[in-house]
Image (tube, rainbow, N blue to C red):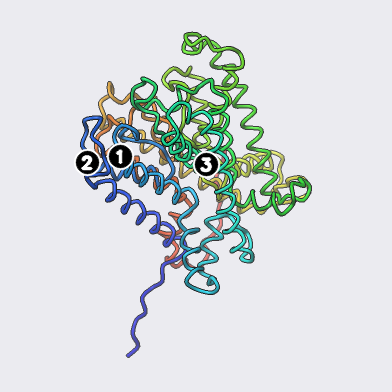
Amino acid sequence: MKLKTKPKLSVWQFLALGFLIVILTGSLLLMLPFASSGRDGQSTSYINALFTATSATCVTGLVPYDSNTHWTIFGQVVIICLIQTGGLGFMTFVSVLLGAIRKNLGLYERKALMLSAGEEQLSGIKRLVRRIFIGTAIFEGAGAVFLAIRFIPDFGVGKGIYYAIWHSISAFCNAGFDLMGGTHGQGPFTSLTYYATDPIVSLTIAFLIIIGGLGFCVWSDIVDCRGNVKKFRLYTKVVLLVNTLMLVASTALFMLFERNNPTYDAQSFSFWDRLLVSFFNATTPRTAGFNTVDLNSLSDSGYLLTVMLMFIGGSSASTAGGIKTNTLAVILMGMFAVFRGKRDIEIGKKRIDYSLVSQALAIFTACLILVMTATLIICAIEPDADAPFKAVLFEVVSALGTVGLSMSLTPTLGVISKIILILLMYAGRVGILTLALALGEARKTSETKKPLDTLLIG
């Protein structure tokens, strides 16, 4: 009698399950008695420990507790380790472990890493992994050095270095967690508002966010081409162009929309202060979660722009979330091609497959449906006075985009609402397409094609 063999987990299922195991392990560690300090007078419930672990692993930044006043050094180290794991990608660590055990990585492991890190070829995976670790160490190390210039005078040598390293990792991984609550005479959940006009802190954090959000394969391509733009792959060119345009346009729009912001006037911001804050506001929704001004003070135009930037996010195969800039670029180029009566999508001297438009539209539509459904449910179960629509929509988009920006709603939400945000953060980090393939890859598709028909559109 032939024994049935156990079905192997697919690449997609392995990736989704890996993130889930890391999250659950982190939640148990955060439940340990010595993980929380109790300085804020709150005990750690499991739902909040799970929420924090999910937010850290999915590099989001939404928190039910202030990270500085609630967690001990042990709890903070657990959080930053989860952030680093989630930022670099669980599959990267698995592949390195497998590489240490086996002489050569197998095809399965190589494919998993390729999909997680954004590499198009199976060759050179080991080199990519090495570059990821070296690049991460260089960028996070440099960021920590610059932040230490400001943090050591403010907090002392030991604490200043610790804060510099912690925030450098959080920024590079686009996590948005901070330890500034209760410092400088401020209350909890203040993020980087104390350093709003400090160019050292603001620009260092902003550039770490941008570099982390570009993606591992972009770094690798830039290194291979030695900075020669003409030799860059099409993907690299699109990512750099779209990111640059969005940063410049968003900074200019924030300068315009917030020109009459009363908070800016109350703090006597100069033109350069406003420019710095606007640049930071344009950078952090892509998807980092730090803020240097009170988000509740934003104008309606500034609020909507922030929501749009959070929904778009950063680049594929990066530490950022959202639908991704390249997804947006493909949708827009596909739209222009349709309007011009063309099926081929041409970018310069290259042409991309039309199937990419279908994938991009599927991701966009799925994310939009998730945002609308989650917002509808949370608004229905939470009191209107405690959870106004604007704050709920902001929180939902922030969770799905793994951003972490908040209008101070998360700590006040009920258990069901927090579970919804947990699921959104998980889906946003693992990826809508990855989850769909993980759940549906094993299903057999019929070979028979149904009769072709048509529908009216537009």
Type of amino acid at the residue the image marks with label 1: Thr
Q: Quadrant of the C terminus?
A: top right
Residue shown at 47% from the left, 50% from the top:
431
The label nearer to you, 3 versus 1, is: 1
**Separation of residues labelled 3 and 1 (CA atoms):** 23 Å
Q: Position of residue 368 (x, y in %)?
A: 46, 39
Residue drawn at x 31%, y 26% is 387
In front: 254, or 388? 254
Q: Which of the labelled discs sits on residue 72, or is there none?
A: 1
Of helix, strand and loop, which one carries label 2? Answer: loop
Locate residue 132 relative to residue 383 in the image: left or right.
right
Find residue 392 and report its horizontal and vertical position in percent: 36, 29
**How dense is the environment of label 2, judged by Cα within 10 Å: few (below 14), some, or many (20 and up)?**
few
Q: Which residue is mark 3?
A: 172
Q: Choose the circle earlier in sequence order: 3 or 2.
A: 2
Is residue 397 something that shows in the picture? no
Foreground of the two, 333 or 90: 90
Q: Amino acid at mark 2?
A: Ser
Q: Which mark is residue 457?
A: none
Is residue 395 in sight in this rendering? yes
Residue 323 percent coordinates (x, y): 52, 42
- In the visual, does 318 lie left or right of 236? left
Residue 45: mark in rendering: 2
Q: Quadrant of the N terminus?
A: bottom left
Q: Which residue extends farthest bottom?
A: 1
Q: Quadrant of residue 118?
A: bottom right
